[in-house]
Amino acid sequence: MQMRIMIEVKNLSYKYEERTALDGINLTINDGEFVAIIGANGSGKSTLAKNLNGLLLPTAGSVVVDGIDTRDDVWTVRSKVGMVFQNPDNQIVGAIVEDDVAFGPENLGVEPTEIRRRVDEALSTVGMLEYKNFSPSKLSGGQKQRVAIAGVLAMQTKCIVFDEATAMLDPRGRSEVLSTIEELNARGMTIVLITHYMEEATRASKVVVMDGGRIARCGTAREIFSDAKFLKKVGLEVPTAVELGARLRLKNILTADDLIVRLK
Ligand code: ADP
Ligand code: MG
């Protein structure tokens, strides 16, 4: 079956003045795919994320989103790829939940009745419709992130990039947001999940490991997380299940792969 390409990154390099943050990245993200990006602090994950929706433009190489080079039409690119960031408080702009969700489509010039329809649909998708008239300040971190996701959905993007969007949440908020992400992917949304929680990355169909501005490895969760030596080398924590698996394997009880599959 021929996969449709959502994002094609070719030989992408990015420099902040003299500092090289990305160095020759090649990555294809297919329509409907769930890709996790992991890597130590400073490895270039956020810089890559911002290049995926034109918040940053390549110093060299190219990023093509749904057939459009980010350098040619950044506005169309941003209407196709939405971003959810780490801090829920920095992303909420409206004083009332529904106004906040309406903000994106308003900026895109969508007409009011269509905006109202989209706001209700988006809030219902993330399970926040009943909070429509709430002040965001009354919400938990996980609820705020779901409102931020609804704001992206209301713009009808084809792909959402989550840059450590669960990092500031408590375990409950994290699991709310993760279920929302999985639900969106099940409905066909392309997902790019940047995370430092290895167990979150095991949900993805493809895991990309960044190290020093390059892709150190790209593979299935099984391939990546069964190599504890490699993970340690690139400065990542080995997921508990893998460590546990390594111990159990010594006793011939279970393989690490068996445990990873069980995490799903
Ligand atoms: P990650 O998200 O994986 O932690 P980043 O993409 O934020 O990595 O950073 C990659 C590299 O670029 C790091 O060395 C970081 O110090 C540098 N960097 C990030 N943002 C800036 C900036 N605004 N100005 C200069 N250097 C930056
Ligand atoms: Mg980052």
Image (spheres, grey):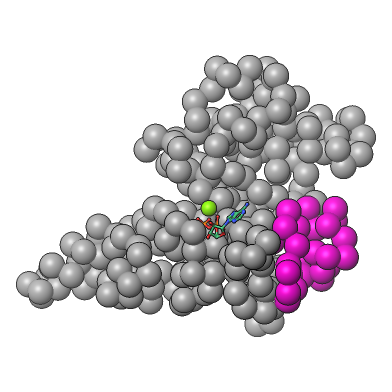
In the image, is 140 to the left or to the right of 1?
A: left
Measured as percent of width and height from the top left, residue 112 is found at: 89, 30
Placement of 247 over or under 126, stated as above or below: below
| Residue 38 visible in the snapshot | no
Measured as percent of width and height from the top left, residue 174 is found at: 44, 41
Q: Nearer the viewer, residue 53 or 214?
A: 214
User: Can you tell which quarter of the image residue 10 is in?
Assistant: bottom right
In the image, is 41 to the left or to the right of 241?
A: right
Most distant residue in the left direction: 251
Placement of 208 over or under 160, stated as above or below: below
Residue occupying the point 68% across, 61% down: 17
Q: Which residues are magenta?
A: 51-78
Residue occupying the point 75% across, 40% down: 154
Residue occupying the point 49% across, 59% down: 42
Q: Nearer the viewer, residue 139 or 231?
A: 231
Residue occupying the point 62% across, 78% down: 24
